[in-house]
Image (cartoon, grey):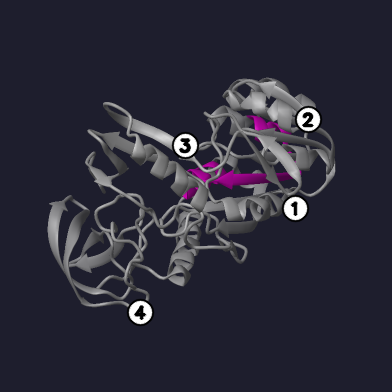
Amino acid sequence: MIERLAAGGDGIARVDGLTVFVPRAAPGDRVRARITRVERRFARAEIEAVLTPGPARREPPCPYYGRCGGCSWLHLDEAEQSRARVVIVREALQRIARVESLPEIERVASPTALAYRSRARVAYERGRVGFRARASHEIVDVEQCAVLDSATETELARVRARPPRGSGELEIRGYGERLEIAGRVLAVGPSAFFQANRPLWERWQAVVVEACGRGERACELYCGVGFYTQALVARFARVVAVERSPAARDARVNASAEIVEAACEDWAPRELAAFAPELVLLNPPRTGCHQSVLDAIRTAHPRCIVYVSCEVSTLARDIARLGSDFRVSRIIVFDALPQTHHVEVVAVLDSV
């Protein structure tokens, strides 16, 4: 029987004391599965038949599910997906960060569970356009995608009508290079990263900025195009935002803060302590923060850190590296990518 869901999205079963990871499984499922790989401490398996479905299992609302690798949880109802994300975050913080006393984990749901995604990376080869198959470079030829919003579906149809020559991947976006969020227009260059869940943009920004509070000095590290930056300017007398990618040029257009074009791991050890921020807002890539950044934050000792993470394992690692100088006061989990196992989480840490 499948006991629960793992951080990577697979179901977990135990067979003769061995942990077995089973893709496309649901908690409570009784399945017949074929072992595909055995390691010293775990094994992997593929479902051959679902004998008794668990209570959260449903018929996936997509004809490509099971072949396409874009979604991993379409077979689960949204309530189970949301519960699983909370459990994954709690376990990571307890196991990796060794946080003994966690606050109640808050949840922010996506306004819609389908047709929400405003950007995607599609693959093409010999006239086929779609998404990579699960655990494969093979392309699943996809005419319509259940999670793309209407504008991005239009972009998919445009690419399918005139497929690029050769083979490769390209990003499609259902928005241009200027978009409006909460009454503000943001410039977003073609190569800049931006969150995919369009219906959640405004709520996401509001929740993070509210968690930052108000004060005199704020520093935003890994600021990207400045999604949060101008909202911080309204709450703090002085805001310094740091970004090394070309997105920094967008941030200069989007916010009246002091934008520094530099790598955070170079700038923070030199400048952060002297700036003496009351707040540090972090939004690093999936790999998390460089150790020098965390060391600089410990030296500067702000009253509050707000850490926006798309990878809970590196968030937990970084919280552990910050040590006992800070305590976790809030945890907010966003259902930012419904139908997938991906977890977006905001951690608020107060100085001790």
Mark 1 residue element: helix
Mark 4 or 2, nearer chain start: 4
The image shows residue 72 at horizontal and vertical percentages of: 34, 57
User: What is the quadrant of residue 219 in the picture?
Assistant: top right
| Label of residue 113 in the image | none
Mark-to-mark CA distance, 3 and 2: 26 Å
Mark 3 or 2, nearer chain start: 2
Where the N terminus falls, by quadrant?
bottom left
Residue 63 visible (yes or no): yes
Q: Are marks 1 and 3 in contact (CB under 8 Å)?
A: no
Q: Do the residues labelled 4 and 2 touch (CB within 8 Å)?
A: no
Residue in the foreground of this view, choosing between 254 and 153: 153
Residue in the foreground of this view, choosing between 125 and 299: 125
Mark-to-mark CA distance, 4 and 1: 37 Å
The range drawn in magenta is 296-319
Q: Which residue is drawn at 13% across and 58% down?
A: 35
Amino acid on which disc 3 is placed: Thr
Count the marks: how many? 4
Mark 2 residue element: loop
Residue at the spot of label 2: 257
